[in-house]
Image: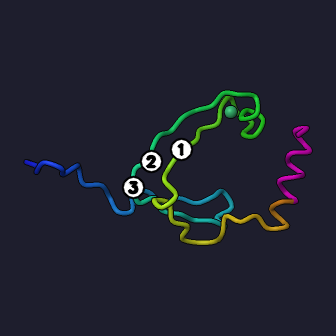
Amino acid sequence: MTSQVGEGPRLPNPLATGRCVCDAVRYRLDAPPLFTHACHCLDCQKKTGTASATTTIVLRDDLVITHGSTRPTAASLARMRAAEAKIGR
Ligand SMILES: [Zn+2]
């Protein structure tokens, strides 16, 4: 297979789709992420309950919310505060 100057490999469209654990929010990613990293700081260990938190950074315009909203609701804020109280934050 040959390619022209300036052409990159063909990527699937969308590049990826996903959802939160409770399926309230779904998204699609239309371009490759900028980078992914794992943080092992104590805050990330407390938030995830694991040895590290993995975070992927994307450009805002490349991430499309396809279902639901990422804005917190009164119920989601109450759940977050209860979870933070449990871990002493
Ligand atoms: Zn961290």
User: Quick one: which residue is furthest to the bottom in this view?
Assistant: 67
Do residues under tags 1 and 3 come within 8 Å of each other at their CB atoms? Answer: no
How many other residues sit within 10 Å of disc 1, few (<14), some (14-19) or many (≥20)? few
**Quarter of the C terminus within the rendering:** top right
The residue singled out by tag 2 in the image is 33
Quadrant observed for ligand 1 in the rendered image: top right
User: Residue 20: where, in percent of width, then height?
Assistant: 63, 58
Q: Alpha carbon of mark 2 to alpha carbon of mark 1: how far? A: 7 Å
Position of residue 2 relative to residue 67, above or below, is above
In primary-sequence order, the first of circles 2 and 1 is: 2
Mark 1 residue element = strand
User: Residue 13: where, in percent of width, then height?
Assistant: 35, 63
Task: Judge whether residue 24 is colored magenta.
Answer: no
Nearest to the observer: residue 82 or residue 71: 71
How many other residues sit within 10 Å of disc 2, few (<14), some (14-19) or many (≥20)? some
Amino acid carrying label 3: it is Ala
Instruction: State the extent of the magenta-drawn residues as a range.
Output: 78-89
User: Residue 56: where, in percent of width, then height?
Assistant: 53, 44
Amino acid carrying label 1: it is Thr
How many other residues sit within 10 Å of disc 3, few (<14), some (14-19) or many (≥20)? some
* Mark 1 vs ligand 1: CB below 8 Å: no
Q: How many marks?
A: 3
Do residues under tags 2 and 1 come within 8 Å of each other at their CB atoms? Answer: yes
In percent of the image, x 59 and y 38: which residue is there? Answer: 54
Mark number for residue 31?
3
Tell me which colouring the rendered structure shows. rainbow
Mark number for residue 56?
1
Q: Alpha carbon of mark 1 to alpha carbon of mark 3: how far? A: 12 Å
Mark 3 residue element = loop
Position of residue 44 relative to residue 30, above or below, is above
